[in-house]
Image: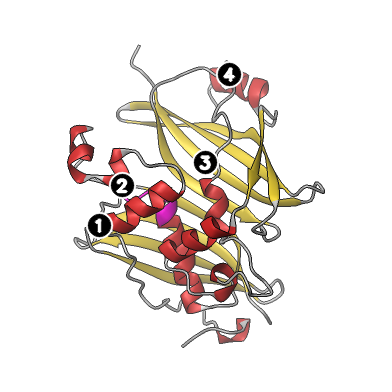
Amino acid sequence: MTIKVLGDVEFGEDLPAFIPDTSLETGAKFARLVGWDGPRFTDHEAAKKEGLPGAMIPGILSQGYLVAMIHNWAPPAEIIKIDTIFRAPVMADDDHTITGVVTDIDEDTALVEIDLTVSNGKGETRVFGTASVKLPQ
Amino acid sequence: MDADIEVIRDKYLNLNFDEKEFAIDPNITTEYARLCGETAERFLDPANEDFQAPPTYIASLSGSRMLPKDFPRFGIGMDAGKGIECLQPVKPGTTIIGKTHLHDIYTKTGRSGRMIFVVTRIEFFDESGSHLANSDSRMVMREKSK
């Protein structure tokens, strides 16, 4: 169900799972776009020479995935705050899934709190986020 | 709070140490949104009446310095997280000003020793001085063994 107003949101509801594009191609394009085109984001072999297991997805792209997921669920949602903790690298070309759950609804301010997690194919948490979003009443 | 951290907090917190202008290019903000997987038209379509940069775009804008010039180096810094606070939309085609200060300094001690966390905040303003957003970068430094 697409969320249009605050009344559509239920406490404890899971957001529809979101599959981010964590391909090396996308991560490298993003890194170049923001001027972070070091090998750790653009080339698996070069990243290994830096001692990494492979190329990584830039942390701020992971943060962008979280916000995109919220807008997929609730297109009119206005992001008020989002805090992201990078627990472990999101490796390029590995499969990842983002899940989210509504943890609070404030009817007076129309704010909804959401916990968000980026996990890899082994179910390991790589990025954790909390967001506060405002919805029309 | 450790005494040495108290001293550093008193010396550095909430003092601007950098200021930089950023031209917000609509071609870049729309591509940024697309690569993140955004589907909302207000981030993708310059013709949309509410066209704006995606909320996390400001996280990609860096000041000239991450730390004040004489800030003590405890160890190699690693990116521990990012936070964004949106007060008003950032409009592509405009120029915004980022003013940087240290917002918080704190420690956590684990089995491998003390880790120092430093939160660098960039406050973004439009050209009329209206506060648009804050971007926090949290850096962790593992203290070198003495």
Distance of label 3 from label 4 (alpha carbons): 17 Å
Distance of label 1 from label 2 (alpha carbons): 9 Å
Say which chain tag 3 marks. Answer: B
Distance of label 1 from label 3 (alpha carbons): 24 Å
- Discs 2, 3: same chain: no
Name which residue type carries label 4: Lys
- Confirm or deny contact between disc 1 and disc 2 (CB under 8 A): yes
Say which chain tag 2 marks. Answer: A
Q: Nearer the viewer, mark 2 or mark 4?
A: 4
Q: Bounds of the magenta span?
A: A56-61
Q: Secondary structure at mark 2?
A: loop
Residue B103 position in % (x across, y down): 62, 36
Name which residue type carries label 2: Ala
Judge by depth and name the residue closer to the eye, B111 or B53.
B53
Distance of label 4 from label 1 (alpha carbons): 38 Å
- Discs 1, 3: same chain: no
Q: Which residue is mark 2?
A: A88
Circle 4 residues within 10 Å: few <14, some 14–19, many ≥20: few
Residue A115 visible: no
Q: Which residue is mark 1?
A: A124
Distance of label 2 from label 4 (alpha carbons): 29 Å
Q: Which mark is residue B133?
A: none
Residue B30 position in % (x across, y down): 52, 63
* Residue sitting at x 60%, y 77%: A76
Say which chain tag 1 marks. Answer: A
In the rendered image of this protein, does residue B40 appear above or below residue B10? below
